[in-house]
Image (cartoon, coloured by chain):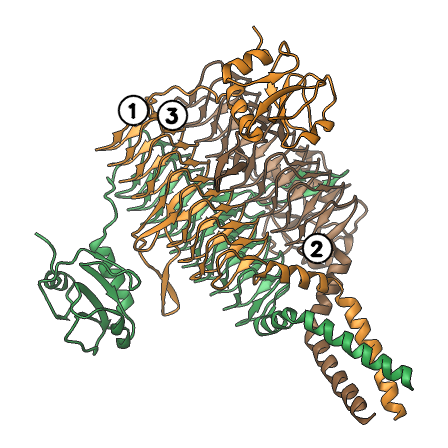
Chain colours: A green, B orange, C brown
C-alpha cells in the first residue's frame, strides 16, 4: 500500500494541510521537483516557485498559508526535511553480524551489535563499541579503540593506538594514524624520526574519502568534537583542530599547528606549520594562513590577509594594466613639463 | 622465434620499407631509442632525430621517404603506434574466474566472463556486466550496476546505488559515491544531511588513483561519457561534468557546479560551488573559476580571469617593483616642480 | 621492574649525570614534559626551559653542565633521542608469518621472515625480500619486485611490473604504478595510450598516505634513493626525482618532468610537465615551477620566481592600494599644473 501524505504525517506526528491522499515517494530538491516528492522551503514566499496543485508535499514554516499546495508544517523546515529523508530513504540493510571472513586478533573486545563485514581485519587488543559498523576491507591495527555507533566505510585503515569517539563516520580510502612526516638530516640524508603518538577523533567527527590524518610524534593529533572533513584532506602530525570545524576538500594543515573551534577552511586552502589559529577563524578558498591568527578573523589569499583587504587588493590587481598606463601618461606629462621648464 | 619487422607488419596488415629481418622487441620513445624498438613520428622531418641504419622501426606518415630507416607507414602514426603497443605488450594474463575468496551477496547478477579476483566483495543486488574485471580487494556496495568491459583496480570502493557504464576504468584507492559534504548548523553544531543520491559514471570514463567522487544529495553526480580524471581529484555532490572532459591531477569541483562538455582543467585548478561553466572551457593550472563562465573560454588565475588578461597581469605584476620606483621618481619630479612654482 | 635512568644508560652504553634512580617511562617533547620522560636539547642554554630537579631525563650535547638536571650526554642529541625512542617504544609485535588468508600467486618468491598479514594478495611472479612486512589488505600485482626490510601498510596497492628497493615504507591508501594520464584525441574523443612502463622506488624511499605514483608510458617513473613523500602527493608518468628529496603534502609533479637530488617542495606546491629542475632546488609552499630551473635555486609563487623577488613582489602587492592612491594624487597635482600652464 503506497504511503500517503496523511499516513506520513501520522507516522512522524506532523500537521499538514492539502491533499492527504497524495502518494509520497521520495524527497527532492526545489530545482528538480518530482511527482510524489517532498521539498522544503525556509520562507513562505518561496512557495511561488512551486506550481500550485502540484503533486508535491512542501515542508513550510509554521504559519505559512496556501490553499493551492500540500503543506507540512515545521518549526524548522530543513531539520524536518532531513527527518523525512531518513524515514523515506533508510540505509540499505546491513546484517548486524561478524562475517566469517573477518579476521579478529587477540584480546579484541566487541560491543553489542557490532558489524564486521567481509574481510575486515582487527589486529590485537582492538576495542569496537556497540552498534558500530565496519564495512568490507576495513583494517584496524593494534590497540585502537573505536566508540559506539561509528560507521567506517570500505577499505579504511586505522593505524595502531588510535582513538575514535562515538558516532564517528570515516569514508573509504582514508587513513587515520599514518606516520607524521618527521626526519632529521645528517650528511645530506634523511633519517626517520619515530612517530609514537596517535590520532584522536572526538565524538561526531566525520572524515571524507581519501583523507590522511597523521599520528603525532609524541602525543596526539586531535580533531575536536563534531568537526567535519571533506575529501582529500591532509592533517599533519601534532595538529589540533577545535570542535565543530569545517575543513572542505583538499585542504591541508601542516605540522604542530593548533586551531581553535569553529575553524572554517574553504576549498584547497591551507595553514602552514607551527602557527596558532584562534577560534571561529575562516579561510577563503585557496587561502594560506602563514602566521598566528586571532579569533573571529576572516582571511584570504596566499599568504593570507584579512579578507576585506584581500578582496580589495584583488580588485586593484585586476586594474594593474590601467595603473601602468596612468603612470606612463604621467611620465609623459611631467617629462614634457620638465623639458619646457 | 623472434618477431621480425616483416612478421609484425603481416600480423597487423601494415606496409613497410627497410630491413624486414629487423627483430622487434618493444615500443619506445624518441627520447630513448632502444634496439629493436618501434617509435613514431608525426612529421617526416623528425626522421632527422633518428640515426640512420639504426635498429629501430619508425612509424611514419604515408608518403615519408628514407632509404636509411625502417619505415612503417600509417595514416595516423600515433594511433598505429598505440595499436603496435597493445600487440607487443599485452596486459598480464588475468584468469577470467571468480576467486574462491570473493564474497558475493544476495541477488548478484554477473555477466559472462566476469573476473572477481581475491577478496572482492559484492554486496546484495549488485550487477556486473560481461568481461568486466574487478581486481583484488575491490568492494562494491548494494544495488550498484557496473557495465561491460570495465577494469576496476585493487582496493577501489564503489558505494551503494552507483551506476558505472561500459569500458569504465577506475584506478586503485579511489572511492565512487562517498557522501556529499552536507550539514546544517543548529546551535553552532553541524548536523548531517543524508545524501541519498548516487554517482553516474558514463561509458568510457576513466578515474585516476585516490580520487573521491561524492554521491548527490537527491539525484546524481554525473561524469559524462569519455571524461578522464587524473589522480587525487575531488568531485563534490551534485556536480555534473559533460562528455570528453579532461580533469588533471589534484583538481577539485565544489558542490552543485555544472560544467559542459570538453572541460579541460589544468593541474591543481578548481571550480567553486554552484556555478555554471559552458562547453569547451579551459582552466589553466592552479586557476580557480569563481563565477559562471561562457562557452569556449580559456581562463587562469585565482579568481579566474580570461587567460590573456591573466598572463598580462602576471607580466605586469612581475614589474611591480619598477612601477613603485617610477611613481617615486614622479613624486620627486612633481614635488620639485610644485616647490618651484 | 621499572626502567631506571642508570639501567637505560647501561643498555644503550651512554654516560649520564644526575639521579640514576629516576624511573624512565617514555620520550616526550619540550613543549609538554611528562614525569619519567626523556627530552633532548641541541644547545645547553635550552636547559633553562626545563624545571630543575624535575623528573625528566635530558639528552644534551657533550660538555653541557648542570647539577639541577638529569643529563644524558650525546654527540648528536637528536639522533640519540631517536635511538632512545626506538628502545622505549618498540613497534607492536607482528607475527613473522604468512597469514592463512593471504593469497599467493604462481611463481612467487618470498625471502626469509617475510610477513604477509591477513588478506594480502600477491599476483603471479612477485618477489618479496627478506624481513619485509606487508600488512593486511595489501595487493601486489604481477611481476613486482619488493626489496628487503620493507614496511607496506594496510590497503596499499602496487601495480604490475613495479620495483621497490630495500627499506622502503609505503603508507596506507597509496597506489604505486597507476596508469599515467595519457590520451590522444581523435574526433574530439580521448583514446587511451597504454602505459607499459613501471615505477621504481629506490632504497629508503618513504611514501605517505593516499599518494598516487603513476607508471611510465615506456620506461620508469623514478623516485631516487632516500626521497620522502608526505601525504596525498601526485607523481605523473615518466617523472624522475633525484635522491634525498623532500616532497611535502599535497604537492604534484606533472608528466615527464625531471628533477635533481635534494629537491624540496613546500606544501601544496607543484611543477608543470616537461621541465628540468636542477639539484638542490627548493620550492616554497604553494609555488608552481613552470620552466627549467637551475641548481641551488629557491623559488616561490605561481608561476615561480626567485624566492627573494617573490617575497618582495608580495610586499609591494600588499601596498598596491597605497600605490593607486599615490598615482591619483600625482594626477591631481600634474593636472593642476598642466591646467595652470
Give the quadrant of the C terminus of chain C: bottom right
Q: Which residue is mark 2?
A: C300
Q: Position of residue A186 (x, y in %)?
A: 75, 39
Q: Which residue is mark 1?
A: B112
**SS for dot 3:** loop
Subunit under mark 1: B
Q: CA distance from mark 2 to mark 3?
A: 47 Å
Tell me the crowding category of disc 1: few under 14, some 14 to 19, or many 20 or more residues within 10 angstroms, Cα based: few
Residue drawn at 59 percent across, 11 percent down? B4
Q: CA distance from mark 1 to mark 3?
A: 18 Å
Q: Nearer the viewer, residue C235 or A162?
A: C235
**SS for dot 2:** strand
B186 sits left or right of C174 in the view: left
Q: Position of residue C138 (x, y in %)?
A: 47, 30
Eyeballing the image, is B198 above or below C261?
Answer: below
Q: CA distance from mark 1 to mark 2?
A: 55 Å
Subunit under mark 3: B
Kindly indicate whether the residue at mark 2 contacts the one at mark 1 (C-beta within 8 angstroms): no
Q: Nearer the viewer, residue B27 or A59?
A: B27
Q: Nearer the viewer, residue B336 or A80?
A: B336
Looking at the rendered image, the disc whose residue lies closer to the viewer, 1 or 2, is 1
Amino acid at each position: 500500500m503506497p504511503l500517503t501524505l496523511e499516513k506520513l504525517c501520522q507516522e512522524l506526528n506532523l500537521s499538514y494541510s492539502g491533499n492527504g491522499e497524495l502518494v509520497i515517494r521520495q524527497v527532492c530538491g526545489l530545482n528538480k521537483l518530482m511527482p510524489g516528492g517532498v521539498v522544503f522551503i525556509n520562507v513562505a514566499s518561496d512557495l511561488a516557485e512551486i506550481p500550485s496543485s502540484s503533486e508535491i508535499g512542501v515542508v513550510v514554516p509554521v504559519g505559512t498559508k496556501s490553499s493551492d499546495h500540500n503543506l507540512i508544517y515545521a518549526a524548522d523546515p530543513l531539520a524536518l526535511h532531513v527527518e523525512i529523508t531518513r524515514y523515506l530513504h533508510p540505509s540499505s540493510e546491513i546484517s548486524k553480524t561478524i562475517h566469517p571472513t573477518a579476521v579478529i586478533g587477540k584480546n579484541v573486545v566487541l560491543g553489542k551489535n557490532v558489524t564486521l563485514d567481509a574481510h575486515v581485519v582487527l589486529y590485537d587488543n582492538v576495542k569496537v563499541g556497540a552498534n558500530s559498523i565496519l564495512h568490507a576491507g576495513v583494517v584496524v591495527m593494534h590497540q585502537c579503540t573505536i566508540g559506539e555507533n561509528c560507521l567506517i566505510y570500505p577499505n579504511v585503515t586505522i593505524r595502531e593506538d588510535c582513538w575514535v569517539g562515538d558516532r564517528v563516520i570515516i569514508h573509504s580510502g582514508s587513513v587515520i594514524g599514518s606516520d607524521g612526516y618527521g626526519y632529521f638530516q645528517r650528511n645530506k640524508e634523511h633519517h626517520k624520526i619515530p612517530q609514537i603518538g596517535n590520532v584522536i577523533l572526538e565524538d561526531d567527527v566525520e572524515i571524507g574519502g581519501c583523507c590522511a590524518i597523521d599520528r603525532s610524534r609524541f602525543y596526539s593529533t586531535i580533531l575536536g568534537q563534531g568537526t567535519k572533513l571533506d575529501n582529500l584532506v591532509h592533517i599533519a602530525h601534532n595538529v589540533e583542530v577545535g570542535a565543530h570545524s569545517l575543513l572542505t576538500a583538499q585542504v591541508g594543515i601542516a605540522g604542530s599547528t593548533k586551531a581553535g573551534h569553529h575553524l572554517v577552511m574553504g576549498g584547497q586552502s591551507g595553514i602552514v606549520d607551527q602557527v596558532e589559529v584562534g577560534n571561529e577563524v575562516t579561510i577563503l578558498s585557496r587561502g594560506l594562513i602563514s602566521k598566528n591568527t586571532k579569533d573571529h578573523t576572516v582571511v584570504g589569499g596566499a599568504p593570507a590577509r584579512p579578507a576585506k583587504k584581500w578582496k580589495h587588493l584583488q580588485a586593484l590587481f585586476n586594474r594593474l594594466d590601467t595603473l601602468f598606463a596612468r603612470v606612463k601618461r604621467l611620465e609623459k606629462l611631467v617629462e614634457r613639463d620638465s623639458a619646457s621648464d
